[in-house]
Every structure is written in structure tokens, then in C-alpha cells.
Image (cartoon, rainbow, N blue to C red):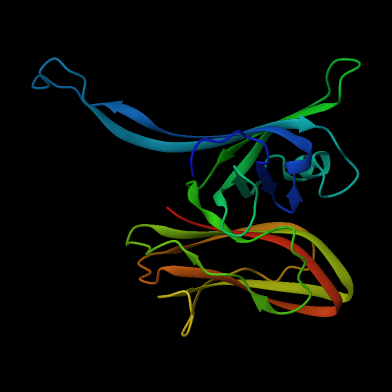
Amino acid sequence: MGKFVLIDARVFTGGADLSGASNKIELNTEREAKPAMNFRSGGWEELLGGLASSSLSGEGQWEAGDPGRVDDAAWAGLGGLGPWTMCPTDATQGALAYLTYAMTGSYKLGGQVGEVAPWTAEAKGSWPVARGAVAHPPGTARTADGNGAALQLGEVDDGRHLYAALHVLSVAGTGTPSITVEIESAPSAGFASPTTVAAFTAATGRGGQILRTAGPITDTHYRAVWTITGTAPSFLFLVALGIQ
């Protein structure tokens, strides 16, 4: 992917898609630089990588009155941990995605008279940030069991993890509709003999989950698989996968 202008970035937290009420989103990752100079350093600094940290910040137009809107989502999540997924260029199948488990630490609303009511928020990462791709897009409603397209992310080496985030954005139907999402791996895109490497808890309402599975995983391809129950069920959800 070459240079581009930020036009259609996407941001998801818990069971909320904040993309339509956001006009700025930033992801920051860093590692502490710890000095290790000594009398044999030749007069130059020597540094070692210390603790790593991450943070997310966003801002946009304030909305409220629904669990999928920023005010409801921010108040519900303030001080708590939850999954966050960011996509720089839309959230289509296979699009680049960054995902993490973070604490919503600050939320600010309100501004100057005559201006569109704004919001700003910041979250601090509690897990590493994983870089990967969208395994299921948020705009495709699912009403029956199925599976997503294959993603070629590569092997997960020993000491690394496969990360998976699920954002259930809308639920419809009667008889307590439920969706259970699992992540399968396979050595090739055909998925002739898939292995289940992660399984989310069954979801009956809006919300988010994030999981990680330790390597080694020698398979190179991954996909989301879902099971849906209920009467006339319909779900909108996002699944993102990454390795870190």
C-alpha cells in the first residue's frame, strides 16, 4: 500500500462503530529507551529497549441515545478494558487492521457556542498492538452459519501470539438470537483440514471480545467461522486478526 490521504479510516470499540462520528484517530506505540552506558562505551550512549506501551486517541462529533454512539459507549467503557480495532483505509475484507485491548481513560465532550458538539477520548493499551487484517467486514449482515474468506497472515512463531478481536455491532431477531464466532487455521487457502485456534463466547447483544493464542502455529491461513441461532436472526459484526 502506497501513500494515501486519510478519508475513510474506521474505528471500533466494544460494540460501537465510531467511524461515522469521528474525524481524527491516532494510534501510538513506543518502547522505553533505557540507558546502558559504561566506561567502555567509547563516549557514546548505549540504549536497551525497556517496557513497551500504546495509546489511542480520537475525536469527532458528539452523539448519544444508542449503545452504538460515542457518548453511550464512552460512558459504559470509562475506566474499563475492552477491544479496539482501527483500520486506516476502510474495514473491507482483508483491509489492514490494528487491534489491541485497552482501557478507556479519558472522555471529554462539549465546546464553543455555535460549533458542532465535539468529543475527544483516549485509551491506554493493556496488551500489545497487533497488526493484521479484517477477517469479516462490518457491513455484511449474517443470518445463518457460515465462514469468511481466508487470510494469509503467516505462521505464529514461538513467543508470539495470534490476536483476534470481535465487535458485535447489531443484533436482530427473536427467540434470543445468538452468534458464536471461532477462528480457524489451515496450511492453505482451501481449508481442507482446519484447526480451531480461538473461540469467542457466544454473543446475544452488542459488545466486544478479544482473544490471543500463543504460538507456535505452523499454519499460515486463517478465517472466521460463525454459528447463528434464533428466529429470523441477523448480525452485523467485525472480526480482525493480527500477529504480534
Q: Residue 228 sits in which quadrant? A: bottom right
> Front-most of 77 and 227?
227
Residue 109 is drawn in which quadrant? Answer: top right
187 shown above or below 242: below
In the foreground, 45 or 141: 141
Residue 122 image offset from top left, x and y in percent:
65, 33
Pinpoint residue 216: horizontal percent, then vertical percent: 35, 67
Above or below residue 196? Residue 102 is: above
Residue 124 in view: yes
Residue in view at x 85 percent, y 15 percent: 112
Q: Choose top left, top right, bottom left or bottom right for residue 11.
A: top right
- Which residue is located at x 86 percent, y 37 percent? 63
Left or right? Give the position of 223 relative to 22: left
User: Is residue 107 something that shows in the picture?
Assistant: no
Residue 27 image point, x, y percent: 55, 36
Q: Residue at x 79, y 75 (%)?
A: 143
Q: In the orientation shown, which residue stands out farthest toward the bottom? A: 193
Q: How many marks?
A: 0
x and y percentages locating residue 124 in the rendered image? 57, 37
Q: In this image, 89 relative to 43: left or right?
A: right
Q: Nearer the viewer, residue 134 or 178?
A: 134
Is 60 situated left or right of 124 in this image? right
Q: Quick check: 13 left or right of 64?
A: left
